Amino acid sequence: MNKLALGVLASGRGTNLQAIIDACGEGQLPAEVKVVVSDVEDSFALERARSAGIPAVFLAPGKYKTKLEPEREMEYVECLRRHGVRLVLLAGFMRVLHSDFLAAFQGRLMNIHPSLLPSFPGLKAQKQALERGVRYAGCTVHFVDESVDGGPIILQAVVPVEHDDSVDSLSDRILKEEHRIYCEAIRLFAEGRLQIEGRRVRILGRGEKA
């Protein structure tokens, strides 16, 4: 099987990026990270990429705080295309993407979010969960569309909330599950087993054709 070419967009520590790099290197995923792109010049995600011998690219986002300027957004698209990326992964990328980017990678753009969507979209999901007193939190891998954290759900993992949890302790337990299900979602995509059907994602059995 040919390896699936991955491109990762990250803004921060890059722990999910590292989990993906490790899974690829250990042969757990039929995939390879071709490029890591960040909107933060000194993000540790870029250091992780360099340490693994992966091209690490900083692209200035422009003047906005929560999105990319249109011309900047196309620079991201062109960079990913130059590296032959087939599947784009958002791993703590703190910018909203718009129609041109989404069209360029339609059905080939995933995100990981630290809540059981559709509950608690947006920022500080773990804090939102604790403030609402939920008994269970978790994480979600989903395809990205025009909505914020509202695209078709691929996989979810449940994490019980303990009575003495802090944002940090809950986040740490959720993060372990993020690493696991993000890699599983990538594997399913590489095997051609994810089929988007409206708002839902169907996971095909082995040997089943879309």
Image (cartoon, rainbow, N blue to C red):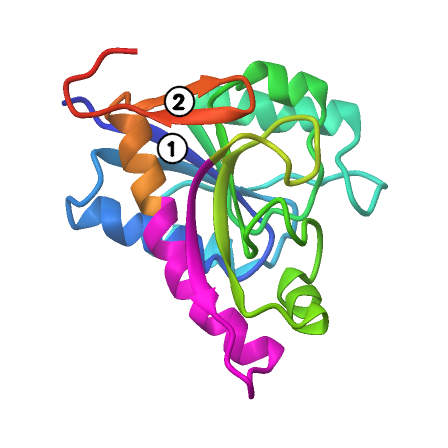
Position of residue 111 measured from the top left corner of the image (x, y, whole percent): 52, 40
Could you tell me which secondary element the residue under label 1 belongs to? strand
- Residue positioned most to the bottom: 164
Q: Quadrant of the N terminus?
A: top left
Res. 86 image quadrant: top left
- In percent of width and height, residue 170 lies at 52, 74
Q: Residue 149: percent from the left, percent from the top?
A: 64, 40
Nearer-the-camera pick, 196 or 67: 196
Whether 91 is drawn above or below 103: the answer is: below
Relative to residue 155, is residue 19 depicted above or below? below
Magenta part of the chain: 154-182
Q: Residue at x 50, y 37 (%)?
A: 142
Q: Are marks 1 and 2 in contact (CB under 8 Å)?
A: yes
* Residue 28: image location, x then y, percent: 18, 45
Q: Nearer the viewer, residue 27 or 189?
A: 189
User: The residue under label 2 is which amino acid type?
Assistant: Arg
Q: Crowdedness of circle 1 by 10 Å Cα count: few (<14), some, many (20+)?
A: many
Left of 79 or right of it: where is 189?
left
Q: Is residue 177 magenta?
A: yes
Q: Is residue 126 magenta?
A: no
Marker disc for residue 6? 1
The amino acid type found where label 1 is placed reads Leu
Taking the spot 64% from the left edge, 25% from the top edge, the residue there is: 75
